[in-house]
Every structure is written in structure tokens, then in C-alpha cells.
């Protein structure tokens, strides 16, 4: 079969690559064309556009880049028509993907959506588009099945693919001493910094994260580099040659860290599943944040807290994200009592997400529906 897959972010590329791997096992004639990244390309996809050319953060940034976004949508529609896929598989990335879903549906192309947009948080009206234009929805968070049922939609809960990815990665992790030696780190305990995957995010988040460095002289701060950003960019933004930046080993860095400062997003869940205490950080443009605040319908921004439906990890948002508060919260999770409590909650989180095998289960269901 011919598969056309669209992922617009690094996390989508990861989950898309694992899905491709499983689809290849079940469909020997599979051919993939994709918008994604290096991981999907590594699984045999013919890459149309890289996600680093697609990611625009916030309302004002989207408006500024509207011409580029509309051009990408028009190009994508033409490319789908030329490719003539048996199925279009969309991975999150709703602003773009829901437009393509409508187009593909009108062309009589079967549409699968893997990893639901966070419409339960905001823009719930999008559920009507999904119901109309998507043939099957595969969700990864336990509360999403109940959410869609409220709109008379029967979706498949497949479990979270992060569990598969982390299990694979964890088996290849080196020891802490080998990790330090390989990346020329000191013997001090590590505090991992995850300032985001987009330039706009990193320019805002990294200086704030590094502003607390002098208050933790017994620790070393190490930046997790996003695969789409160059080391020179981090050097420019950090303006501190003593701070190490490591790319392509984010999971291992988190695993070996004593604690982490994490920009809100999928990384908050990844950090929790790797068992590292964290502080969740977010600061956006004033206009974008004001609009988002008026629209968002959930209590938390972190997936950890959303899944658990209670405050497990501290969220420092907008004005609360300042040097004083970061120092206070980071000290708290480095202390035994707060640390132990958070780690115990992480165990409960793991149970809620179900077992491993999400990618394989999703692939099996997709093949079943395509043949049915």
C-alpha cells in the first residue's frame, strides 16, 4: 500500500518512525511518502519536507508566517494528488493537518489520525471537523477515549508510544561514568536543561534557565540540544562557554540527570517516564499568551499533571517563570522528601498509561481497517 504521512514536529517524527517500522513488518509492499524528519526518513520514507521548516510557535508567529504556511498547504494538496496514496496518516499538528484531512476526504482518500490534537484543552469545536473528515482516530492518552465518546465518536486508545521509544533507548544507555567521559562532563551531578526545539522558544527559555546556575555551584548544567538546531546557535544564546550542550542523546541526558528544567510539551512526559524530577517552564509572547489563556480549558499545561489530574510537577508559567522561583522549585526537587514524593507519583503515571506496544497495536489496527 501507499502511505502518505504528515508530522510537523520532532515528537511526531519519532512516533511516525516507530509506526513506519511496525507497518513495514505487516505490509511487505508498503511505500511511504512523508512530511517529518530524519527518523522517518531512516525508516524508508521519501521525505517531502522537514519539520524544522514547518514549526511556528504561537499566534503572532503564525500570522507573521502565514504566507509560508498557506504555500505549504497548497503544495501538500498537489503532492497528495500526484502521489495517490491508499491512506493519509496525520500525526498531531492540527492547524495544518485538519485542513489536509478535509481536502483528502473530499478527494475520497481514507484519513487516519494518529495522536489526537489537544482539542480537549482548547478549540474543542475542532472535534466536529475530525468527526466529519477523519475515518479512524488513534489516541494515546487514557482520558481521550472518554472525551471523544461525549461527541459520539468511537476512537481507539492504543497506549502511549513514548513507552516503546523509551524502552528501546534505555536498553542502549551507557553507565553514568561512561556518559560523563564520552561527553567530557565533570563529576558533578547533572541538571538537564530542555529549552525547547524551536529557535523562538530557546531564545526565551535558555537564558532564564541559566540564570539560576550560580545558585547551584555543586551541579553542572547541561543543555539538551534539539536535532534541528546547531551548536553555534546555543553558544550564541547561552553566552556561557562553561555550559555544555549535547545533541542526539536527550533521553540519556535526562536519565542521568538529578533534575531537569523542561519547557512545556511532550518533553515533560518524557522526563517523568525516565524518572527524573522536573520543573515545567513556559513563557511565550504576551499577545500569544493572553489569547491562549482566554481559550485554554484545562487546569494544567504539563501532560504529567493532565494525565494524573492533579499537580505532580510544578508549572512555572509566564510571569511566575523567573530566577527566584526557578531556584526555589529546583532546590525543592533536589531535596529527599519532595523528590521521593514526585518519583512515587511517576510510578502511578506509568500505570495509567498502560503497557508498551502502542506502535505495533496502531499498525495492526490500521492494516485491519484498510483491509476491512
Image (cartoon, rainbow, N blue to C red):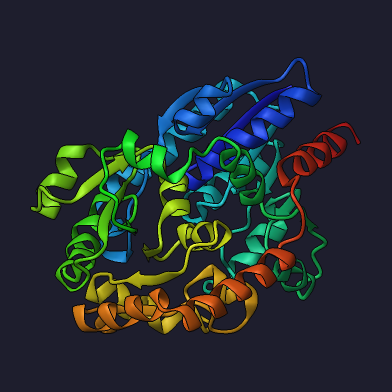
- Using the image as rendered, state which of residue 78 and residue 185 is in the foreground: 185
- Specify the quadrant of the image occupied by residue 261: bottom left
- Using the image as rendered, state which of residue 107 and residue 174 is in the foreground: 174
Q: Position of residue 365 (x, y in %)?
A: 83, 42
**In the shown orientation, is residue 316 left or right of residue 287?**
right
Q: Residue at (34%, 71%) from the top-left corner?
A: 281
Q: Residue at (74%, 22%) from the top-left corner?
A: 1
**In the shown orientation, is residue 338 left or right of residue 206?**
right
Q: Residue at (64%, 23%) from the top-left corner?
A: 84
The correct choice, above or below, for 51 with respect to 80 in the image is below
Task: Report if residue 189 is visible in the image.
Answer: yes
Question: For the C terminus, which image quadrant?
Answer: top right
Q: Position of residue 325 (x, y in %)?
A: 27, 83
Find the residue positioned furthest to the right.
372
- Specify the quadrant of the image occupied by residue 31: top right
Task: Report if residue 9 is visible in the image.
Answer: no
- Using the image as rendered, state which of residue 63 and residue 276 is in the foreground: 276
Amino acid at each position: 500500500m501507499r502511505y502518505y504521512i504528515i508530522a510537523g514536529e520532532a515528537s511526531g517524527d519519532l512516533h511516525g518512525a516507530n509506526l513506519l517500522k511496525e507497518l513495514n513488518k505487516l505490509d511487505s509492499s508498503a511505500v511511504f511518502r512523508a512530511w517529518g524528519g530524519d527518523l522517518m526518513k531512516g525508516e524508508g520514507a521519501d521525505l517531502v519536507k522537514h519539520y524544522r521548516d514547518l514549526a511556528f510557535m504561537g499566534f503572532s508567529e503564525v500570522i507573521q508566517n502565514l504566507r509560508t504556511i498557506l504555500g505549504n498547504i497548497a503544495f501538500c494538496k498537489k503532492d497528495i494528488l500526484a502521489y495517490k496514496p491508499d491512506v493519509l496518516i496525520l500525526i498531531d499538528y492540527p492547524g495544518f493537518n485538519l485542513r489536509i484531512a478535509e481536502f483528502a476526504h473530499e478527494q475520497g482518500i481514507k484519513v487516519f489520525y494518529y495522536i489526537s490534537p489537544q482539542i480537549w484543552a482548547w478549540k474543542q469545536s475542532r472535534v466536529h471537523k475530525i468527526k466529519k473528515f477523519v475515518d479512524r482516530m488513534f489516541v494515546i492518552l487514557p482520558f481521550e477515549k472518554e472525551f471523544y465518546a461525549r461527541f459520539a465518536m468511537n476512537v481507539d486508545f492504543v497506549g502511549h508510544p513514548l513507552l516503546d521509544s523509551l524502552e528501546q533507548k534505555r536498553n542502549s544507555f551507557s553507565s553514568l561514568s561512561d556518559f560523563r567521559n564520552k561527553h567530557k562532563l565533570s563529576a558533578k551531578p547533572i541538571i538537564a536543561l530542555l529549552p525547547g526545539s524551536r529557535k523562538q522558544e530557546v531564545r526565551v527559555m535558555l537564558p532564564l534557565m541559566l540564570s539560576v546556575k550560580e545558585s547551584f555551584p555543586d551541579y553542572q548544567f547541561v543543555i539538551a540540544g534539539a536535532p534541528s538546531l546547531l551548536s553555534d546557535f546555543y553558544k550564541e544564546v547561552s553566552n556561557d562557554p562553561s555550559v555544555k550542550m549535547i545533541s542526539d542523546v536527550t533521553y540519556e541526558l535526562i536519565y542521568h540527570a538529578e533534575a531537569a528544567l523542561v519547557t512545556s510539551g511532550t518533553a515533560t512526559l518524557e522526563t517523568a517516564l525516565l524518572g527524573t524530577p522536573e520543573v515545567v517552564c513556559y513563557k511565550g509572547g504576551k499577545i500569544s499568551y493572553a489569547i491562549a489563556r482566554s481559550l485554554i480549558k484545562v487546569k494544567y499545561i504539563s501532560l504529567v499533571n493532565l494525565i494524573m489530574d492533579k499537580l505532580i510537577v510544578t508549572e512555572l508559567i509566564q510571569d511566575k517563570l523567573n530566577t527566584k522561583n526557578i531556584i526555589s522549585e529546583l532546590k525543592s526537587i533536589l531535596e529527599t522528601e519532595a523528590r521521593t514524593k514526585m518519583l512515587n507519583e511517576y510510578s502511578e503515571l506509568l500505570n495509567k498509561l498502560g503497557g508498551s506496544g502502542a506502535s505495533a497495536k496502531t499498525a495492526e489496527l490500521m492494516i485491519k481497517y484498510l483491509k476491512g
